[in-house]
Structures are given as structure tokens and as C-alpha cells.
Image: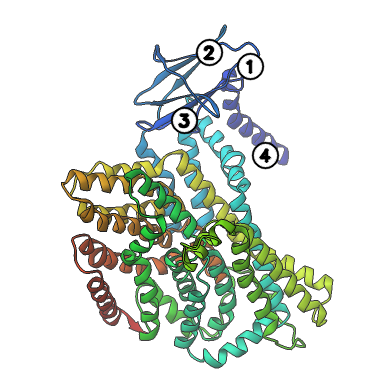
Amino acid sequence: MLKLIANRLLLITFILLAPLSLIKADDVSTSYLELPPAIMKHVPTVIRIQTANADDFVEPILMIDGVKREILSDEEGLYLEYTFTEASEVQLIQQSRIESKRITPIPLWLSILPPLIAIVMALITKEVFSSLFIGLLIGTSVIYKYSGISFFVAIFKGAFAIIDTYLMYALLSHEHLSIIIFSMLIGGMVTLISLNGGMKGIVNILSKYANNRRSGQFITYIMGMLIFFDDYANTLVVGNTMRPVTDKLKISREKLAYIVDSTSAPIAAIAFITTWIGAELSYIQQGIAEVGLSSSAYSVFLQSLKYSFYPILTLIFVPMLIWQRRDFGPMLKAEKQAKMATQRSTEKKGRSPQIMKELEVAEDVQPRWFNAVIPVFIVVAGTIAGLIYTGWNPAIWGNDHLSFTSKLSTTIGDADVFNALIWSSLAGVFAALLLTTSQRILNLKESIEGLINGFKTMFHAILILSLAWSLALLTEHLHTAEFITGLLTSINISPEFIPALTFVFSAAIAFSTGSSWGTMAIIYPLILPAIWKIGLEAGMDTEAILPLFYNAVSTVLAGSVLGDHCSPISDTTILSSLACSCHHIHHVRTQMPYALVVGSIALIIGTLPSAFGFPVIASYALAIGILFVFIRLKGKLI
């Protein structure tokens, strides 16, 4: 019987793998044509050309559909930029060698399928891993299918490409590896300060002030506002620190994750001195250089802050919810369950009973608050010190024409945030290790085991992050953002409507790709010159265009943060779930209604009227009043 089953399995395997042998030999032969991973219809494609023999160079000839094309050169070598609109034959003639490739461009609308399918599946099935994998498989299979491979083989090669191409490239990124290392170190430190009684000591102290659900949420909110300089540090430090306190007060993990997530990116995006400021200023500088503005990028950023309705209203909406003790939608259900529950299900909330058992404090360990405060303070202070150290420029600080705020913001904007985070978290781990062993709470072996257990707690989130990064890379190859932004630029409307549409499309791109930074990088170079040009064509002078320009600068940022808050494949959303030990999809489903309510009011009451000249202060006053009344009418007391 077993032999029969084995033979059938071998037969099935042979049948499945047989089509792979049908791949043409040309696919594995040496190619001097370097094509991008995906060639999209109506999107400019850069074709790179490698010379066959550097010692006996003869300029190659490149023909597309029998027509000779002009070959250009740059520092990377020879290339041609061409926009494919239909299936074409590309021929490269070098010396006596002729290389031909049949190119079938992929319809641009297919680029939206991978993120869309991943997001819809995640929301329906409440399971992230398979949703992300299916989204990736759809995208990679489409790429291989349009490369001329049969459908069946395309699925196989697409599945392999998820691992050997997209996941591998995602993990080889310096920034992504830095986030993984930082997350693991924070997880190890949190586990260690839990085992040495430090976290319990903090809980005992905070319990004196957080003696009810309202005060517990307020303290979480205040901590989130204080750690304003980086969204990753904010999420991991506040979530891990406040989780035991909110558990004791029967505040749901979903509510904790919402407060943490809503005080990370919003405050980091608009604060004067954050790890975001460097990227924001560089994108703005590109825009103002193209339109010919004499203003500095930092002054434009400051002028645009008053139009950042979504981040500011989010930071106001959270304490309004807490103060009124009201919730609505899925969050209301989660809060009721948490308040009525006598014992929390650790497995449901994202940590296995075994891991939770390993985090339990021994009965003979005396709770000492400084065992947790010192490592956490070192992480916070160390991050700030690392940002200043890596971004220090004597020329900036020697310039008497710059204010102190400008000097500091420029320094942090030029800093290496990832190195600063790694250094500070490593210092925090060393501090926790020293405090634990010096007081003989745990010996060195037990402390190291605790650290390793802390690393284990991060595996779930790291896997999700890795798949999310892979999907983001795939959407970049498929030009998903170009599909969405193309809809915006093709609409011929009044300039006053551009900021509102920019907000919507930025949110849509950030939601689809899970990256607010990626959205800013794509939208800023497109929308800033566009709104200036549209304003001039509408007969507006410079003074009339500037408010719209500032509004557009802010709406790209605000829309990116909104889409990031709603997306289940966003790294900050995933990190918030991780830090709060909240089921990831539960966090997304409970946070999304709140984000959409604030986003809708920010758009209708703030962005749109302000573009037509309505006073910004009046917009904020009206929006805050509407949010207050909405919570009062829609929300239910907890």
C-alpha cells in the first residue's frame, strides 16, 4: 500500500515538473539585453545593453520591429528608453551575433491585482501569510506568463521567484535588515526587562496614575506623543511598555494598537525634527527645483504644515475618544469583550501560551522600575544621540544665518536613522543584561535564554514584514503607482480640486503598496510640478498658486499616512500589532473605521474648502466640532 502511494506521488511530481523541461534553451543562454523584471504597456522601459567584447568594441545595433533605434549612454553603459504599446520584436546585433527577444507588454491595469487581492483576502480570511503569498504569486505569474512562458510553467516559476527573487531582495535591503535587527533587539530587551521584574515595577508605578481605563489610555497617548522622533521606535517602545498596564485595566489590545499606531506616523510626519524630515525635504526640494521656486524646502514644509489635516486631526481624535469613553464599530465590540473578560486568551492575541509562560516573572523576583526605565531611556536617548552623531555637519552648525531649529532638523534629516536605531537598541539590551546579571536576578545563561526567547516573539511579525516588503517590490516592478497616478493626471479639472484628489490617490497608493515613504517618493515628483503647471494654465498668478502648492505638499504626506493606517500590509501597522500582541487583522479592522472617519472629515472639511480659500483655522474648528459630535452620537459608552 505504501509503495503504491509512493509511486503515485512520484508520478504526480513528474507530471507537475515535466513542463519545466519545455523551457527554451535561450532562457538560460548568455543574454546581452538587460530587460526590467516587468515590461508594462504605455510605461517607458529602459533596456540596458552589455557589449560582447570590450577589447574589440563595435557599437551594437538595436532594432525594434525592424526599425533601428538610437542607443544612448550614461555612467552605467549603453541603454535605450522605449515605450511598448503592443507585442514587439527586439533585435540586438553585435559583431556577428544576433540576439532576438519577443516582448509582450503587460497591461497596466493588471498591476493593481497583486496588492488588491492580498488586501481583500487578508480582510476576508483574517489570515495574512497566505494572503500575501497569493498576492505575490498572482503578480509573479503574470510577469512570467507575459514573458512567453506557458501558464502552468509561469505559476511554477512565479512561486520560485517569490523566494529566490522578491523575498531575497527584500531581505538584502540594508534598511529592511536594520528594521529586523532592531525589532529582534527590542523584543529581546522587552523579554529581559519582563523577566527581571522591571516591567512589573513600571506597571506598579503607572497603576497609581492609570487607575482606570481612561487614565491608562491617556498615559499611552502621552507616551506616544513624547517619542515623536521616529515611528518605529515609538511603536515598539510604547506598545511593549504599556501592554501590561492596559491588560490589567482591561483595555483591549485592539485599542492599545490603535492608540500606538495613531501616535507614531502622524506625529513623526509633522514634527519639526524627526527621521521623516530628511526624506520629506528631499522630495519637496525636487518639486520646487522643477517649478523654479526660490523658497527653501524647509520653509515650504513649514508653510504646508497647517494643511496637514489628517495627521493633526488624528492626534486630536484619539484623546477625544479617550475623554468621552466612547467607541464605535468593531472597536466597540473589542472593548466590550476586553472589559467583560476575566482571563485573556493569549493564543488569540498573537502569543503562544508557551512564550507567555517564558515571560512570566518568578515569584522571588522583586519588581524594580529602574530595571525597565534605564534600558528604555537608553533606547530613546541613544536614538536621538545616534541621529545627531550620524547627521552632524560642521558647515551647518557653523552657519550663523540658520536658526537652531533649522540646524537640528537638517542634522536629523541627514542622519542614518537605521544605524541610530540599531545602536540604541543594542545599548538597551546590554543595559538590561547588565542590570539583570549584576543584581543576580538571573545568571548569564538564563539571561541569554531570555534574550533568545525575546527574539522568537518577533518571528511572526518579521515574516509578515518580509512578505509585505516583497509585495512592495513587486508593485514597484509592475508600476502599480503609475496606474493609480495616471488616473489622477488624466483628469482635466480645476486646480482647486488637485489637493483633494492628491489626498485620495496618495491614500490609495499607500493602501495598495503598504508604504507611506514609497508613496511620497512617487507622488511628490509628479504632483508638485503638475499643480504648478495646471495653475499657470488656468491663468493664476504665483501668489494664488502658492497656497495650492503648500496644500498639495501636505496632502501627499497626509494621504500617505491615512493609507498606511488602513493597509494590512503596512510595516507600521504590522509593527503596531506586534508590539501590542494584537491579532494583526483585528487591529486593521478595528482601526480602519476610525481612520476613514477622520480622513473623510479631513478631506471634506479641511483639504477641499481650504483649497478654495476657506480659513484654515475655521476648518480645524469645524472639523473638531464635527468629530466631537460624531463620537457623541455614534459612539457608545464603555
Residue at image position (29%, 54%) is 549
Whichever of labels 1 and 4 marks the residue nearer the N terminus, that label is 4
Q: Which mark is residue 145?
A: 3
Q: Residue under label 2, please give it.
A: 59
Q: Dot 1 surroundings within 10 Å: few (below 14), some, or many (20 or more)?
A: few
The kind of residue on which mark 2 rests is: Glu
Q: Which mark is residue 5?
A: 4
Whichever of labels 1 and 2 marks the residue nearer the N terminus, that label is 1
Closest to the observer, 484 or 54: 54
Residue 412 occupies quadrant = bottom right
Measured Cα–Cα span from mark 3 to mark 1: 34 Å
Element type where label 4 sits in the image: helix
Q: Residue under label 1, please give it.
A: 54
Q: Is residue 349 left or right of residue 636?
A: right
Where is 625 relative to 207, above or below? above
From the viewer's perspective, is the residue at label 3 or at label 1 nearer? 1
Element type where label 1 sits in the image: loop
Q: Position of residue 46 (x, y in %)?
A: 46, 29
Closest to the observer, 297 or 366: 297
Quadrant that contains the N terminus: top right
From the viewer's perspective, is the residue at label 1 or at label 4 nearer? 1
The kind of residue on which mark 4 rests is: Ile
